[in-house]
Image (cartoon, rainbow, N blue to C red):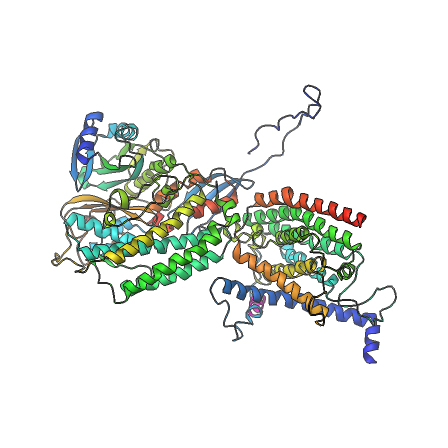
Amino acid sequence: MAVTELPTAGMLPGGPGEGVQVVIAGEELPTQEMTLSIGPQHPSTHGVLRVVLTLDGERIDTATPVIGYMHRAFDKLSEARDYRQIIALSNRHDWLSAFGNELGVALATERLMGIEVPERAQWIRMLMAEWNRVLNHLMFLGSFGLELGAMTPMFYAFREREDIQTLMEMATGARMHFTYCRVGGLKEDLPKGFLQYSEVLVKRIRHRLLDYEGLLLGNEIFKKRTVGIGVLPGEVAKSYGVTGPILHASGVAEDSRKTEPYLKYSEVDFDVPVGNHGDSFDRFNVLFHRIEQSLKIIEQVHAKLPAGPIMPGKMPKYLKPPEGWTYVRTENSLGETGYYLVSRGDTKPWRLKMRTPSFHNVSMIPYLLKGVLLPDLIAVLGSVFFVVGDVDR
Amino acid sequence: MIFYHFFSNPWAVFALKLAAVFIFFLTAPLFLGYVEHKGLAHMQSRLGPMEAGKFHGWAQLIADGVKFIQKEDIVPDAADRRIFMLAPMIVIIPVSLVFLVIPFGPAAVSCHAPAGAGACGFWGENFDVGIFFVLAISAISVIGMLMAGWASANKFSLIGAIRGAAQLIAYELPLVLAASAVAMQAGTLSLVGIGDAQKAYWFVFPQIARFIIFVIASLAELSRPPFDMPIADSEIIFGHMTEYTGIRFGLFLLSEYAGIVSLSAIAVVLYLGAWHGFFVPWIPGPIWTLAKIGALSFLVIWLRATYPRLREDQLQKMAWKYLIPIALVNILLTMIFKVVF
Amino acid sequence: MTPDEIEAHITEATGAVERSDVVHGEVSVWVPNDKWVEVATHLRDCGRCHFDLPTFLTAVDLEEQGFEVVLHMYSVRRQHHVNVKTQVARDEPRLPTLSGVWNGMNWCERETWELFGIDFTGHPNQVKLLLPVEFEGFPLRKDFLLMTREAKEWPGLKEPAEVEH
């Protein structure tokens, strides 16, 4: 029941005190809330997220995300796998930013073992991480448009993704789950022609980003659907543990590439785009500009990439980090991906907690969905960029 | 001589026209569907269907139709069985009836129709109240939509159907107002008469606003992007069609594309000079009509590739706050011009 | 603040720190169970700490010593981290909830509850989050055998849970 009070008795025109007072008597029509279960199989949830809504007409009263359909017990599995295997395991949960995930595991293990990663490997890691970020963001750029009913950006995004995947395939041999990181460095050096193609791609994608700008960012209907929808204040975002582009859109420029640079992020120049209002449009806009920043970083890597080995000269035969613990945070495509690693000197971790951005971002959804219209559910869900595998792990 | 006898028999003419309308009703949407497949694909840097029929997938839509017929006709357990099965027919019949009255060409000169039937030509039937008939009958589809949405016993269907009904109520008004301005200008309600009246100039030129209103309102009536909220696939799966499969779903799709053709045809007759061409007058009238219908239908497809979807309340706001007042002012202006000149 | 300063500040301000250390640039402070909420609230509200972004909450199975609950926080303004840890008993793991302190703790605690069986008293909605409702047991405890191992013994190194069985 949304209308709990009787309609206020209005005064018909006729000046103060002279009008006829209208009293609406009798009982109101009984209305009932409708429970609508969106998902787990629903076109707009990028996988198997389920959102249970109670609707009053088309207005959402409460929204409860139901997760866990893709839970595959990463934490438990990794206690039964050695560190090399965990790298392969970790790049599957957020299938859109595989390299960023495996990077975190490698960094955590290296930090515990005190391995010094060669310069060149660090630069290449950064290059791959940034390309992966572009890959990820393009996906969300396209799918957000698709969810709002504009189907063309999706195909454009996939055209660009195809190019980048070809590039990644040159170096890693895989198109989605790269498994290119190794503890200590990388699987192998970049192949011949990689950097040239990478340079070509940077130019091509930068040029094609103009298409998206025209199709979506400058589109009146798109703005009407997203501006002022799903406003997330920075304080609320922080208290939910939200990170990444969503936090930036709320005006908080917290990016561990800046505040706690890992790899070589301290040696490249880039900005963290932030939004002003924290609405769906800002989130989308931030995502768009993050691509530009990533391309900027990639260009700098092209210029600065040193020669040298990609693995340390001497590596232990078994990866046995000494007893201890560490927490490594990396700015992954969707926010902070962290690994809380506890070792007891075994070949397998004692405890590996994976902190994923999507989990925290999705936990904030009930806040955003309260009181919006059903069509805005799409504008909100699409702009809370999440990968369900990353939520459920 | 034999043709003379043939055409002087009203039943023969009737049967021929019926067959022609029916064939047009079945083929034009198929052709349009194919154009949509290919056109959208090329706008989105892909190829679209390439396999069916070898040459650029020309037989794709036929293959789709065969597939729809072969599929099992599933009726959900909880559905209201009879209404569920009836709904697609209710949607498609009004759309097909519209084609009866659309004039594709001028009246034939040597016409031996029986007295009282009016001049015969490239149309199925020349009603004196043709425009009224068209607008009235095309609104019936929404009843089928509501039936489908309610009988499916699915919440998504229901939301879609109610959105569709609300949208139709809002957009029927600007549509009728925009069309009635044309009827006033032409001085007749007959579609053939309106076509004839555009010999000197097309009705789109004096007031382009009403043509735009008509196109926007038709898009909303057809639930085509950017007004496809009733079937918004990312929110409510497929609106009232969610539970349908097989040939019944096919009928819904056919009615959507037939609807595009029919409303484009009406717009052509009302605003774009019907069969009157320009520059190359030797091209026969029906070809002009078909070309204009094609161009307008292509615009509908083009919009789908370009725009995201509006929100239901924004759509309503647009209808009641902008389109209807503009249409009313338009009628007023038309009246003044009619009286003054 | 630098890690050492944070360590000193928390020890001084809350007076509840049992022990603390700094490893790999990360501060950890161990607090008693009953001061858990108090310390967390202080860390959120204190202007010098200003931990406004709770990163995660999880637990580590310490076998016979019970569980160690880890709360990691970050301050966007001050740009520093802290790990607040506490130990709960194995036979009756219980801890007051932090879901009133940060919104984001709600899901983290639900997850920790279902995976470790640590009961967060006062939690508004302590139901299964990732696991199916009918799931029994607390999978991240070391005595819970990985299901594949239950089906077929692993020829290589044994897990702790396997050795007991």
Query: Magenta segment range?
Result: B63-70
- x, y (%) of residue A210? 43, 55
- x, y (%) of residue A202? 34, 59
Looking at this rendering, what residue extends furthest in the right direction?
Answer: B115
- x, y (%) of residue B12? 80, 72
Residue A354 appears anywhere in the view: no
Q: Is residue A136 above or below residue C26?
A: below
Question: Horizontal placement of B16 versus B226: left or right?
Answer: right
Please check the rendered image and state whether residue B64 is part of the magenta-colored stretch, yes or no: yes
Q: Is residue A311 above or below residue A114?
A: below
Q: Which of C164 and C58 is in front in this view?
A: C58
Q: Which of C86 and A112 is in front in this view?
A: A112
How many numbered circles does the render carry? Answer: 0
Q: Quadrant of residue A16?
A: top right
Magenta stretch, overall SS: helix
- x, y (%) of residue C104? 35, 37
Residue in the picture at 41% in, 55% down = A209
